[in-house]
Amino acid sequence: MTALPIIRTFTDAQGIDITFYEWPVAKPRGCVQLVHGLGEHARRYDHVAEALNRAGFSVYADDHRGHGATGLRMTAEGTTKKQGNLGPGGMPAVFDGVRQLSHLIVGENAEEPLVMIGHSWGSMIAQRIYNKYSDEYDGLVLTGSSLLIPGLVPSSGFNKRWNKTPNKTGYEWLSRDEEIGREFLNDPKNFPDTAIGVFGITNTAKLMGVPNKQIDSNVPILLMAGSEDPLGGEKGNKKLLDAFQKAGVHDVELVVYHEARHEVFNELNKDEVIADLIDWLDDRLDAHEHLDEI
């Protein structure tokens, strides 16, 4: 039996080799594409992929430019100076790379629905992709997200509320689970920085925007947020919910987890969060299958 995940690569339009991971199942009910956040990498979602596998979903996730195995290779080859730098093409090339993986997934699973799950920076990437290409997907899940307008999303100081925590790691804002901060700090594939610090102002600005009326109104959207997330939290996600509704999306739902912080998939109640995700996927994709049969 092949050990999972299967590690693969594709080459993007600028010639950058992108590492991605595949957790396949036989006869999948659908496919899920995980889009990770800033300063982290796809393998932090192994436990999510494994739970989705048990529920019958094949899972794919890439290490974006500047991140994880992709980013380490870019710095080793001299393409970039440090982890997080995006290289030629900048942020638009990241968007294109995520879509390129989507097309690869569909090419290998032509009969299966595809749902994108974006976390934090990955949720921002997903929002920008959805504004133009929502008809290429069958669902969207955003975690650690927010409506992306200046003044609403902070650019730094995420751990300020917890800076007086004894033996702090600086990553208390990620989760109430103290082990998560220690693991993040000790993982050489992670790095501490801000979007402006590694992407620059111009590339960071390309993440800003609001849902528009080009979005397919029938594509279901799930927002999952921790009430104590300093990035968006309940306030930013309620504004995002409202914006999707104003854009005409018929099925958009917000679930707020009381006292949870930024990484709901790594929270003390992560089993509840992942179960809620799978229930939503079951419900929405069953409805999708029913519509296909009509």
Image (cartoon, rainbow, N blue to C red):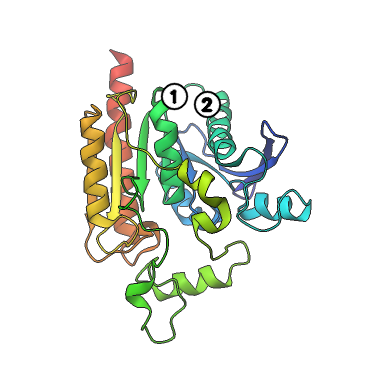
The quadrant the C terminus occupies is: top left
Q: Within 10 angstroms of label 1, few (less than 14), some, or many (20 or more) residues? A: some
Residue 108's x, y, as percent?
A: 57, 27
141 lies left or right of 80: left
Q: Quadrant of residue 214?
A: top left
User: Looking at the image, is 219 positioned above or below residue 205?
Assistant: above
Look at mark 2 in the image and give the residue it sits on.
106
Label 2 residue SS: helix
191 lies left or right of 292: right
Residue 102's x, y, as percent?
A: 52, 31
Residue at far top of view = 294
Q: Residue at x 63, y 66 (%)?
A: 188
Residue 154's x, y, as percent?
A: 36, 58
Q: Residue at x 48, y 44 (%)?
A: 34
Number of numbered discs on residues:
2
Residue at far right of view = 77
Residue 121's x, y, as percent?
A: 45, 49
Look at mark 1 in the image and give the residue it sits on.
136
Q: Residue at x 40, y 42 (%)?
A: 208
Q: Earlier in the sequence, mark 1 or mark 2?
A: 2
Amino acid, disc 1:
Glu
Q: Nearer the viewer, mark 1 or mark 2?
A: 1
Rounded to the nearest angstrom, the CA distance separating label 1 from label 2 is: 9 Å
Residue at far bottom of view = 166
Label 1 residue SS: helix
Q: Are marks 1 and 2 in contact (CB under 8 Å)?
A: yes
Amino acid, disc 2:
Val
In this view, the residue in front, 11 or 43, is 11
User: Looking at the image, is 65 positioned above or below residue 267?
Assistant: above
Q: Quadrant of residue 138?
A: top left
